Amino acid sequence: MKKSNSIDLHGRYYDDVDLSLEKHFYDNEPPFKIITGNSSKMKEKVLKYLDNNNHKYMSGNMYNQGYIQVL
């Protein structure tokens, strides 16, 4: 498996999020970042996917809330 640092979902359609994440997890091993931008709806969809699939993560940092770190 190849290893990637991130997947950029910023600007993608909400309906494409689950499939994009599924493909990224299939092709890559954590740890990596999921770039969501500042959209609360995008973050909500990503967090729901991660929770439903039992992935460990932490949200951004105090200076940049536009990503989620998958552990």
Image: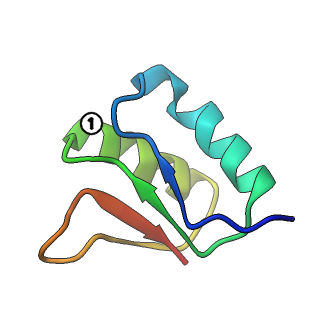
The answer to whether residue 50 is left or right of residue 19 is: left
Work out whether residue 37 or residue 19 is closer to the camera in this orientation and state it. Answer: 37
Residue beneath the point at 68% across and 49% down: 24
Residue at position x 51%, y 58% in the image? 51
Quarter assignment of residue 29:
bottom right
* 18 left or right, relative to 67: right
Residue at 69%, 43% (x, y): give it.
22
- Density class for disc 1 (Cα within 10 Å; few <14, some 14-19, many ≥20) is few
- Outermost left residue: 63
Amino acid at the residue labelled 1: Lys
Q: Quadrant of the C terminus?
A: bottom right
Q: Give the left or right position of residue 34, taking residue 18 as reference.
A: left
Q: Count of labels shown?
A: 1
Q: Residue at x 41, y 26 (%)?
A: 14
Residue 18 found in image quarter? top right
Disc 1 target residue = 41
Residue 56 versus residue 38 in the image, above or below: below
Image position, residue 35 (x, y; %): 39, 53
Q: Compared to 1, does 7 lie above or below?
A: above
Residue 68 pos. (x, y %)? 38, 63
- Camera-nearest residue between 19 and 3: 3
Residue 56, how many percent across, how many down?
54, 73
Image quarter for residue 2? bottom right
- Quarter of the rendering occupied by the N terminus: bottom right
Q: Position of residue 33 (x, y in %)?
A: 47, 64
- What SS does tag 1 mark? helix
Q: How is the image coloured?
A: rainbow
- Residue 25 lies, with reference to residue 56, above or below; the image says above
